[in-house]
Image (spheres, grey):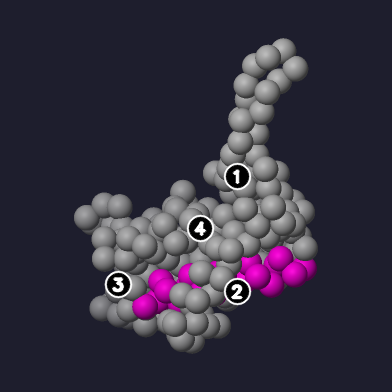
Amino acid sequence: MPTSQPPLMGQALPVELMNTVFADRHGVHDALTGVDGARRWLAAVAPRLDAPVAAAADRVTGDDLARLRRLRDALRRLAAELTGDPRAAAASAIGELETAVRTVNEHVYSARSTPILELTGDGGVVEEFRTTGPPGELVIGAMAAEAVHFFGRWRDLDLRACLAPGCVLYFIKNHPRREWCSTACGNRARAARHYARHGKPPTTR
């Protein structure tokens, strides 16, 4: 049976969100097709979120899910533009680059969390967070802000589309010799090249 869990590759959060569209031997999958799937993915990345955002991650609603998917699609459109992505299976539901930029910017204005100082009963001082808006909007606003910081480095961002057979993931090229999102994809690409040269079927996922 196909898995419903996308890979987490230690990439920047916007890349991890883009990669909630992923593929295995059964085809292309979307980890954000339901609220439960969104909550599972958010729980997996929660250790990398600010405390108030992580606490809100298990409270996303159906409306929040639609916004999260829309943000994800906007990021995939930006990634396709930046990488010159030729993969039809990886194409975003958002076709226009201008729409993708506008979508990210709109989501930045979702709920916010602001750090403040609070006095404790014993005369100490601690950091607390004051949030505005529903919990799910706080999560989406944080993700959109991360995306702004990420894609704001447009000319210096070495983002790549993984061109291994069947893959629809993106990754940051963090080593001069890195060509694929994972070792498994590298193996598949080499097997496909071997098949093309020698006529032997490549190994599957």
- Graded by Cα atoms within 10 Å as few (under 14), some (14 to 19) or many (20 or more), the crowding at tag 1 reads few
Mark closest to the chain's N terminus, 3 or 1: 1
- Are circles 4 and 1 on residues that touch, CB within 8 Å? no
Residue to which mark 1 is pinned: 114
Main secondary structure found in the magenta portion: helix
- In the image, which is nearer the foreground, mark 4 or mark 2? 4
SS state under label 3: helix
Nearest to viewer (mark 3 / mark 1): 1
Outermost residue toward the left in this view: 176
Decide if residue 79 is on the left or right side of residue 7: left
Mark positioned earlier in the residue sequence (4 or 3): 4
Q: Quadrant of residue 161?
A: bottom left
- Give the labeled residue for mark 3: 194
1 and 2 marks in contact (CB < 8 Å): no
* Residue 170 visible in the current orientation: yes
The residues colored magenta run 62-81
Is residue 72 found left or right of 118 in the rendered image? left
CA separation in Å, label 4 and label 3: 43 Å
Query: Which label's residue is closer to the chain start, 4 or 2?
Result: 2
Query: Mark 2 or mark 3, which is nearer the start of the sequence?
Result: 2
Foreground label between 3 and 2:
2
In front: mark 4 or mark 3?
Answer: 4
Q: Nearer the viewer, mark 1 or mark 2?
A: 1
Locate residue 186: give its quadrant: bottom left
Please provide percent x and percent y for residue 16: 51, 58
> Is 33 or 72 nearer to us in this picture?
72
* Residue 164 position in % (x across, y down): 38, 70
Disc 2 residue type (three-letter): Arg
User: What label does residue 88 carry, if any?
Assistant: none
Q: Mark on residue 70?
A: 2
Question: Label 4, on which residue?
Answer: 145
